[in-house]
């Protein structure tokens, strides 16, 4: 393999990420259809996003620890089987409770897939390309919002929301085939790290602050994105048929921001960590003004996707560097942290809407959450630099 060539296995991981990303975000484009079909409020339908995210947060460490001694290819294939079964259950669900349970089942695969997948991705490339390798896998997630979610929103509009989950089930089967064919059979000849060592590695302050940075820095996105459909139709004034095209713009922004974040992190991880979160906060603030006109709403929906996904590779790489003794567990926990952020953001948005604050207040709430994440990132960097200085003094 030449240093400039992308290993085919990264594309297999990206196919799996595409399927998982589609099911994670699909409810945003189906919110009103699900609400009307199941006889629940918009706020209750929004909690289907929180339920999925909570399942990821709980499932990520539990499944990662349970599968820590198994071959990584077998783990990834098994996770995609769980994902596919969960989406099949969504496709046949006839009640809100059944749909919520099926969403939680599908979510259990999410955290460990991206966590173990991140470790596999970084093992396939040289040191100077590790963050970009993570970004390549996450390109599947970006393409999910660019293609998968708008396509499912279109299916939901014309054939009902069940059709969207049938399509995602088919994607899951395709992802399993891609992983089986393209992922190498690797065997780790090193002695396995003890459970105690792994737990100590993730219990340290650098990792915990890093996880908190992910939760608060990313939560702001989902205060807004959870309610993107009603924001587009009720605040900006778009018709329902325009939701899919605008979601396409959001996905295009993600597809641009994802590799950009990886390249920035490969150059300077600390600068990328703070810089991408700061850019996200600025976009959220301006979004509050931009959503009242159609062309600015489209523009800033794209910029939101770009700023949002530029943060992913730096946040994921930061955790991997802080917990080198437990990479799979730490990586999975950070995916759980992303989804706890999703749940927190969706819950905050739902509470704001349910309590009468109005959809127009959501960008301001979102920006405040991301500012907290920036403060935590600055704290994490200060602690890291102090630790490095202490090591240098000891060596001197």
Image (cartoon, rainbow, N blue to C red):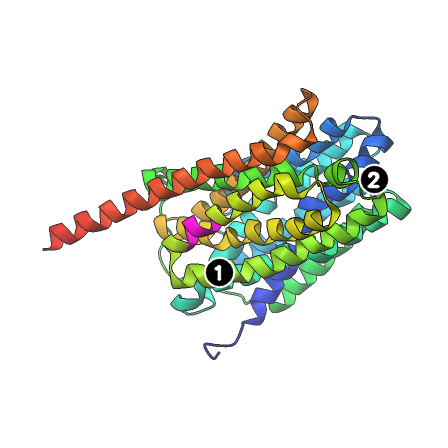
Within-10-Å neighbours for mark 1: few <14, some 14–19, many 20+: many
Location of residue 304 in the rendering, given as x and y in whole percent from the top left corner: 61, 49
Circle 1 SS class: helix
- Front in this rendered view, residue 82 or 29: 29
Q: Which mark is residue 92?
A: 2
Within-10-Å neighbours for mark 2: few <14, some 14–19, many 20+: some
- In which quarter of the view is residue 350 placed? top right
**Residue 81 in the image: above or below residue 103:** below
Disc 2 or disc 1, which is closer to the eye?
1
Q: Residue furthest top?
A: 355
Location of residue 195 in the rendering, given as x and y in whole percent from the top left corner: 38, 42
Residue 273 is inside the magenta segment = yes
Q: Residue at x 77, y 45 (%)?
A: 88
Please report whichever mark, 2 or 1, sits nearer to the chain's N-terminal start.
Answer: 2
- Front in this rendered view, residue 351 or 336: 351
- Labelled pair 2, 1 in contact (Cβ < 8 Å): no
| Horizontal arrangement in the rendering, residue 102 relative to residue 155 (left or right) | left
Residue 71 makes an appearance in the image: no
- In which quarter of the view is residue 178 placed? bottom right
Spatial separation of the CA atoms under disc 2 and disc 1: 38 Å
- Front in this rendered view, residue 181 or 4: 4
| Horizontal arrangement in the rendering, residue 225 relative to residue 331 (left or right) | right
- The residues colored magenta run 272-276
Q: Which residue is mark 1?
A: 262
Q: Main secondary structure of the magenta part?
A: helix
**The C terminus lies in which quarter of the figure?**
bottom left
**Residue 134 in the image: above or below residue 296:** below
Location of residue 314 in the rendering, given as x and y in whole percent from the top left corner: 45, 53
- Front in this rendered view, residue 144 or 57: 144
Residue 172 is inside the magenta segment = no
Q: Residue at x 23, y 46 (%)?
A: 387
């Amino acid at each position: 393999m030449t240093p400039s060539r992308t290993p085919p296995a990264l594309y297999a991981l990206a196919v799996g990420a595409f399927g998982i990303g589609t099911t994670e975000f699909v409810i945003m484009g189906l919110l009103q259809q699900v609400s009307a079909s199941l006889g629940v409020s918009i706020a209750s339908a929004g909690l289907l996003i929180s339920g999925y995210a909570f399942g990821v947060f709980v499932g990520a460490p539990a499944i990662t620890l349970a599968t820590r001694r198994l071959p990584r290819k077998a783990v990834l294939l098994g996770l995609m089987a769980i994902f596919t079964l969960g989406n099949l259950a969504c496709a046949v669900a006839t009640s809100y409770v059944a749909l919520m349970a099926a969403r939680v089942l599908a979510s259990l695969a999410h955290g460990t897939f991206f966590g173990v997948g991140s470790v596999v991705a970084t093992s396939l490339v040289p040191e100077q390309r590790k963050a970009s390798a993570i970004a390549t896998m996450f390109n599947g997630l970006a393409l999910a919002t660019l293609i998968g979610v708008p396509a499912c929103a279109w299916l939901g509009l014309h054939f009902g929301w069940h059709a969207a989950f049938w399509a995602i089930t088919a994607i899951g089967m395709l992802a399993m085939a891609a992983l089986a064919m393209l992922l190498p059979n690797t065997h780790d000849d090193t002695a396995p790290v003890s459970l105690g060592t792994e737990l100590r590695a993730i219990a340290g302050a650098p990792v915990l602050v890093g996880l908190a940075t992910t939760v608060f820095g990313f939560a702001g996105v989902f205060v807004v994105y959870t309610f993107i459909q009603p924001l587009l139709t009720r605040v900006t004034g778009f018709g329902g048929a325009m939701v899919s095209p605008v979601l396409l713009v959001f996905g295009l922004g993600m597809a641009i921001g994802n590799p950009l974040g990886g390249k920035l992190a490969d150059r300077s991880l600390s600068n990328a960590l703070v810089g991408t979160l700061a850019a996200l906060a600025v976009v959220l603030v301006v979004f509050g003004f931009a959503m009242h006109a159609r062309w600015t709403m489209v523009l800033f929906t794209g910029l939101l996707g770009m700023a949002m996904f530029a943060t992913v590779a730096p946040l994921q790489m930061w955790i991997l560097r802080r917990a080198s003794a437990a990479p799979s567990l730490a990586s999975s926990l950070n995916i759980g942290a992303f989804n706890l952020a999703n749940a927190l953001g969706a819950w905050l948005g739902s509470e704001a809407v349910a309590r009468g604050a109005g959809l127009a207040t959501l960008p301001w709430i979102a920006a405040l959450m991301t500012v907290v994440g920036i403060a935590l990132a600055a704290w994490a960097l200060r602690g890291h630099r102090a630790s490095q200085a202490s090591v240098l003094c000891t060596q001197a």
